[in-house]
Image: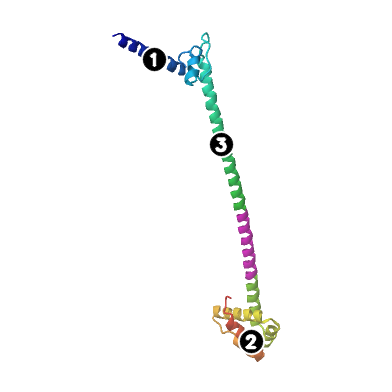
Amino acid sequence: MLGKIIILLFLIAAMAFGGVLWFDYLNVIDARTFLAPVYRLIGLQGRTQPAVDPDTMLNLNDERFAILVEALDLQRMEIDNREIDLRNRHSEILQMAQELEERQKALEDQQLSINALLSEADIRDRSIEQTARDLTGMPPQRAVGILEAMDDQLVIDVLRKTEEIAQAEDAASIVPFWLSLMPPERTAEIIRKMAARPPGL
């Protein structure tokens, strides 16, 4: 019986000692000074938080304030990251807007060039039509004399326009008669070029 009692007392002492160690480690009690030799013996450290003066009251407002400050710091970091993202996105949008503006300007310049070319082509077409009508109203010999002074391409354009006007007015074309009055070599060259370059080219 005595042996069992001794064993039980030893177990109780061991459990009590272990409980003290555990509660000190959890910072429930302050046994660091008393158990310092034991800590050094088994290679453990006691509390990891600073000791609190027993006469000092815990201030929950300070704890809440510390948590609030930490939350605000996290929120500020998130806001800073969002601000950086927004700045980057703003820069990308400005770059895209500049590229679109440059493309729009290029398209406008291209449209102006096309309009200028169309205007020149329209002016030239009206000029050729007027020339064709003027020559049609002249005596054939005089009209042929004027045609011979022109370059081949202009002669071809005037002859074709004259034929278009005759077809539109359902009248006989005077172009074959003009060609017959020209020198044969010039007539052959003009006919060859007209065949090599169909209307509209």
Q: Are marks 3 and 2 in contact (CB under 8 Å)?
A: no
Q: Which mark is residue 189?
A: 2
Depth check, mark 1 against mark 2: the one in front is 1
Name above or below for residue 95 compared with residue 22. below
For badge 3, the amino acid type reads: Asn
Residue 76 rendering spot, x and y as whole percentages = 56, 30
Q: Seen from this angle, which residue lies furthest right? A: 149
Q: Main secondary structure of the magenta part?
A: helix
Q: Quadrant of residue 112?
A: bottom right
Mark sitting earlier along the chain (1/2):
1
Q: Does residue 174 appear in this view? A: no
The residue carrying mark 3 is 81
Q: Element under label 2?
A: helix
Secondary element type, mark 1: helix
The colouring scheme, among rainbow, by chain, secondary structure or one colour, is rainbow
Residue 20 is one of the magenta-drawn residues: no
Q: Which residues are magenta?
A: 102-122
Q: Nearer the viewer, mark 1 or mark 3?
A: 1
